[in-house]
Image: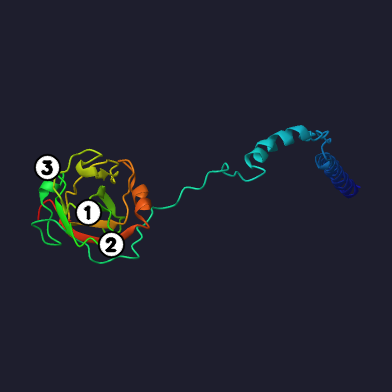
Amino acid sequence: MAGFQGKFTKIATAIGVAGIIGSALVFLFQEGHRVAEPPTAVQAVPPVQRKPVPAVREKQAQTPLRAALPAKPVLPPKGLSPQPQGRPELQLDHLAGTLRVAIPGMAKGTRLPLEHSCYRKNQSPPFAWSGAPAGTKSLVAVLERRQAGKPAAWIWLVYDIDPKEGSMGGGVPRSPDLPGGARHALNTYGKAEYTGPCEPRGQIPYALRLFALDTAIDLPAGISRAQLIQAMNGHIIDAAEFPVVHYLRF
């Protein structure tokens, strides 16, 4: 009898433990089920509806671009021709080859005395000529600066020189009109006068050029180089030059 009671007690204890374990499993299952449940859905916010840009605004934004492009090319007024590009060149196609020019007391290619430069008296050099061909009515004298890589510069321009004189003295007046009817044209510096060499360094080549014309220029003093060349072209019957060098010191 005592053995039977002991067995019964053990069975009852096992059943009680099993009940507790079962209750615990049910509780855990329910809690897990609650966690797994999806949260209550939040009502989505509707997207912002952007209004299209009005057609009027779009047209206004494009108007300046259309206005910047002319409908037709802009043409110059009638009666006006385009300005010529570059500088006119001397036409030296038909030369007699008899004209000669020289600076008294100098040999070709030698140093121009400093009295003819801006460092001393800045006086024009004297020169003489010979061999003017028949039909020469006037002479044009030019002192030209020649530097490699640069256009030639005319620093002294005298026209309507009387060919019968045979020479021109140095230190001509600084005025547009000269004695004997000769006139100054505008030089590279925009002056109707002699402007001597003024480079402080280097040996700069220059040349005194003389042109014989079959006509007189007969234009007022102070004309431009381009105007002088245009008046000369078609009338140059001979030309000569006398090269010199300018330098301030050795």
Q: Which residue lies furthest to the left in this view?
A: 105
Q: Earlier in the sequence, mark 1 or mark 2?
A: 1
> Where residue 242 appears, x then y in whole percent?
19, 60
Crowd tier of the residue under label 3, counting other residues whose Cα lies within 10 Å: few below 14, some 14–19, many 20 or above: few
Q: What element carries label 1?
A: loop
Of residue 218 and residue 31, the one placed in the foreground of this image is: 218
Mark 1, residue position: 163
Crowd tier of the residue under label 2, counting other residues whose Cα lies within 10 Å: few below 14, some 14–19, many 20 or above: many
Q: What element carries label 2?
A: strand
Residue type indicated by callout 1: Pro
Label of residue 70 in the image? none
Is residue 15 left or right of 64 when viewed as pictured?
right
Crowd tier of the residue under label 1, counting other residues whose Cα lies within 10 Å: few below 14, some 14–19, many 20 or above: some
Task: Evaluate whether residue 194 shows in this view.
Answer: no
Mark 2, residue position: 238
Q: Residue at x 69, y 36 (%)?
A: 63
> Where residue 74 appears, x then y in whole percent?
60, 43
Mark 2 to mark 3: distance in Å?
A: 32 Å
Q: Which residue is drawn at 25% across and 67% down?
A: 97
Query: Can you say which quadrant of the picture contains the C terminus?
Result: bottom left
Mark 1 to mark 2: distance in Å?
A: 12 Å
Residue 164 vertical position relative to residue 9 in the rendered view, above or below: below
Label of residue 121 in the image? 3
> Where residue 29 appears, x then y in whole percent?
84, 43
